[in-house]
Every structure is written in structure tokens, then in C-alpha cells.
Image (spheres, rainbow, N blue to C red):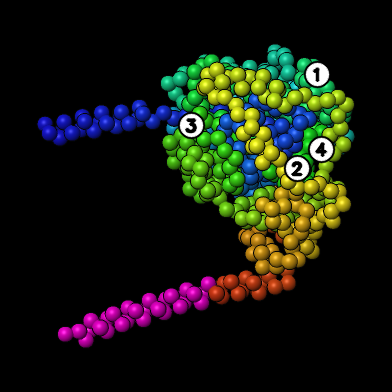
Amino acid sequence: MFFTFLFIIGTLILNTLSEDIVKPNIVFIVADDLGWDDVSIHGSDQIMTPNIDIMGYEGTILHQYYTDSLGTASRSALFTGKYAIRLGTHGSSIAATEDGGVPLSERLLPSYLQDAGYTTHLLGKWQLGHSRKSYLPTSRGFDTFYGFVTGSVDYYTYSHVESFNGSAFFGLDLFENTHPVDNQTGHLADIITDQAIQIIRNHDINKPLYLHVSHAAPHAGGGLVHLQTPEDTINANDHIAHSARRLYAGMVTGLDKSIGNIIAALAEREILDNTLIIFVSDNGAAPVGATQNFGSNLPLRGTKGRPWEGAIRSIAIVWHASITPQIWNGLFHVTDWLPTLVAAAGGKAPTGIDGVNQWNALTKDEDSSRKRLLLTVDDLNGWAAYRDGDFKIIIGDVDKETSVYLGNEFKELRLPVHLYESTLLSSEAAHVFKEILDLYLDLDEIFHKRDKLSLRSKHNISQEFNFCVPSRESGCLFNITADPLETTNLWPSLPDVVRRMVLRLRYYWAQINPRCLVKIDKKSDPSLRDFVWSPWLKDNEQVAKPIRDRPRFPLKVLVGELQYLIDSKFNNFSETMSAYVKSMADSFLENVSELFSF
């Protein structure tokens, strides 16, 4: 009887504790190719993003957040917690005509959240494989999917065009789960927002929600018309002189409005106060290049798809009602989301991943759990970047024309800019936070934070710098904490740091799952399936894969590099041997003393 009583009491206590632990809803919003300079929280007065800014001022801003340099690499790292080199998803993003995806041996973030009791939904972009049904979102942990599977689509017709060798494949790329949607109308950003609001309104609040909203904006469109946005968002940016930049700004305005509407929907459903909202971009903007969207990464160098800060250092904001607002300067990498969110959900992250759990660091204002990270690798083009503490190293053959500050010509104005304070205070997010959460904006504190976030106000841009651009003979080394604009090359003056970081890059390079050149599969042609980008291979269908030799390390062996390696290994060996001999001697003396004790 006594043990039965204890069992009942223990069960009651456990049930009470489990009821007290309320798992947060998670809404994860991803922008596509959004530039550092294209959010007003970073100090830009050209494009206003009041909803994003309010979320940042009232939340935690990750000021040193790093992604990979291209979409598939960044998204695969987010969902697996692993560097893209381990998955074979680094470098060029998966093409629409390519048989490939995140390896099926990998378990993705939504499946871990399903284990923790979450309902999981993906809206918008996928681009992690669609040649086989087993690669699709609903086969990888998402309960529902409404969006597109290639890298980009036309914002009004939802079609994707893939051009090569003077010809093109084209077809519809909009799906509900695995079924094509051919009766949709409207701008894609509005459609994704409406779908998000519908999911929030219909959600069973007795279960935690994971809603991943992966916007197409402001990526260039995937049809034959690249910059498309509703007229009202263009009018909101009529002060911008460059006409293409004005269209891009309209796409960002639509993205910002979407975030405000999602926040309002969460408040309407009365679940905002227990919802973790995250906003990031998958990588930097493309001011030049094949996917040019006229975004700006200034004052950072470079464009998407390169190893410079403009491609890989991105905006990231985390908001929850219980998290103290702050600018968090710790290192955070895209691979950290999986273990961090699994921890937030009360689950246990897998071992053997590259991501680290930053949940306590974010919620308790602790130092970052991360001190170093592999930034980006492209073994086809032959370059790599790595960060260790304050230092960042870049090696390999990087295009000089895209290694400078790009987009200055986009900054011209033809009319006065809108007043920042009034735009901020009239936003949907400001209204919701004030009326629902009783949060009032302190404008003095806001301007103080905005000034701290503005890299432009602390570092000068000059095209007259003798820019370091790496080659196979010599790389570039920067103190990126003091010099985020990558102006001063420390390679010649810090040989020990160079050797140590190059050796670390060699270690990662040896682990690369080599990326092969895209092989176009003619069976992928949508015209064979009613002009729809549907899977064209069976899950178990065997297809010959090209075999690629181990890629060559993109830097010649440095003078003294081998000696540095030998010295460091020898020192470790000497220390190990000394400790071993000392332990043997101590043991011998102890035994002898026992032998002669009386």
C-alpha cells in the first residue's frame, strides 16, 4: 500500500511538472538574398523595414551571425546542423534539372521537433532536392508543405525557367504537399503570408507549432521577369532614383509587411507571448551576377556566392517575450539552429554535428558557445574561408571584380527619404507589441542601438584601398572583429596565425564530399509531366553518378608550414611522454614505499 501511495504521488508530481513546462511555438522566417544594407535596423534610411526593426529592438540581434554563401548550402546546414561540405551541398545550389538533394541518411530539424510533439509546416522555398519524392519536404519531417522546390520562381505565374546551352526547360513550380497548384493567383509573397496566417488560425494550441516561412523575396524571379512587386510597395520607395533598386526595395517592403502580418496573426490567436520568432537571410544580396537583384551588402565587401563578409554575414533576430532585448556579439553559425531549437523544444540534439547549442547563451546572456567556424567552401571554384576568434582567413582563387564594395550607385535618391521614427511607430509590429504585450518603444534607446549596429558609421569605405584578393600563392588574413570591412591584410605580419588556420582548413578540406559539376538530366524536362517541376525518378532508381577526384587544396604549401606542424606535434608528443614518465615514476615510488614500510 505504501509503495502504491508513493507511485501515485510521484505520478502526480511528474504530471504537474510536465504541465508547467510549456514548449514555445517556433516561427522561423527566412529571407532570400537580403543584403546587409537593405534593413533599416543596420542604419540605412533608403529601405525602411519597421516590422523587422521592431522585432530586433525588442528581441536579440545576432550581430555576428554567419550563413554559407549560397542558398542550398545555407539551408542544408540549417536543417542538418552540419557543414555543407559533409553533405555534398556546398558551392553551387542544387539545379532544377539535377538529381540530388540532402542525403537521405540525414535527419532534418523538423523530424526532431516532431519527436518533441510539434506540428511542422514549411511555406515557400525548399531547394534541397526534388528529383525523387523521398527528397521532398513531406518526406523529410514536415507535416505540410506549400511552396516551390527549385531556387526561384516567377512571382505571379509561379513558373521556373532553367536555361542551358541555348535551350531551356520551363514549368510550374508551386505545390501543396506533393500536388501541383494550378489555380493560384496573386503575388507569391502575399500567398505565402496568407498561408502562414491560415496555419496560425487553424493551429491546435494544445500542441506546439513549428512554422518555417521561407520567402522567395527578395531573390530575383525564376522566370524571364526578375524583379516583381505589387504597385503599393513600389510607391513606398519612390524616393529611390535607381529604377531596378526601387523594384528590389518594393520586394523588401512586401517582406517586411509579411512579418508584421504574421506577428499580428499570432497576437490574434493569443499565442504570441509564447512564440519564438526568428528572422534571418539565407545569405547576402546579389548586387551583380547571374542572379542580380540590385540588393546591397554595403559597407561589407562582395556579393552572394563568394567568401567575403557581404555574402556570409547576415541579419539574424531572435524574439520571445521572455528574452531580454540585447545586441548579442557572440559568434553564431547557421548550423547552430538545429541544436539550439531542439534544446528550446526540450529535446536532445544529435551528436556528431557541427552546430552547437546556443540556447542558454541567448536566453541567459552568456558568452557564445562557439569560438571558431568553417565559413564557406567551394571546391569547384577553388576557395575556402575559416574564422577562429577574431581572425578570418580566405584562400584560393576568388574573382577580383566581385571582391570589392558593390552597389554604391544604388544609393542615389531623387526625393527625401521617409521619416524613420514615424515609419517605425506606425508599423504593425509596433502596434501589436504596444497593445497586446504592453511594450513601449524608447526612441532614445532605439537610436542608440541603431548607431551601434551601423558598421558604416564606425568604418570608412574607400575604393582606394589596396584590397587583398587571395590566390594559390597567398591568401588573406583579417582581424574581422576590428576590421569587418576586410581592408587590412595581416597575412604577411602574422605567420603563426596563418599557419595554424591554414592547417585547420586543410583538415576540413580532407573531409569534403566533393561537389560535381551539374549534370543535366533530360528526363527532368517539365514538358514530360504537363509542364510541372515534379519528381522524375523513382526513389530506388539507380542513376550513374560522376566520379570526381579529391579536389586539390587551393593554396600551395607555405614555407614553414610543415615545420610548424612537426613542431606542434613534437611538442604534444614530448608533453605526453613527460606526463607518462612522471606517472610511472610516481607509481614506482609509491610501490617501493609500501614494500619497505614497517
Name the kind of residue labelled 4 in the image: Pro
Q: Earlier in the sequence, mark 3 or mark 1?
A: 1
Cα–Cα gap, marks 4 and 1: 22 Å
Q: Nearer the viewer, residue 284 or 94?
A: 284
Nearest to the observer: residue 551 or residue 197: 197
Using the image, determine if residue 12 lies above or below residue 497.
above
Give the left or right position of residue 368, taking residue 163 as reference: left
Q: Nearer the viewer, mark 3 or mark 2?
A: 2
x 30%, y 28%: residue? 15
Q: Which residues are magenta?
A: 572-598
* Cα–Cα span, label 3 and label 2: 31 Å
Q: Name the element at disc 3.
A: loop
Q: Work out whether mark 4 precedes mark 2 in sequence or the reverse, and give the earlier one.
A: 4
Image disc number at residue 287: 4
Label 3 amino acid? Answer: Ser
Residue 144 placed where, x, y %?
56, 24
The amino acid type of the residue labelled 1 equals Asn
Q: What residue do we see at 83% from left, 29% from top?
A: 245
Q: Is residue 107 visible?
A: no
Mark 4 → mark 3, Cα distance in angstroms: 38 Å
| Circle on res. 322 | 3
- Amino acid identity at mark 2: Arg
Q: Which residue is mark 2?
A: 456
Q: Is residue 477 above or below residue 189?
A: below
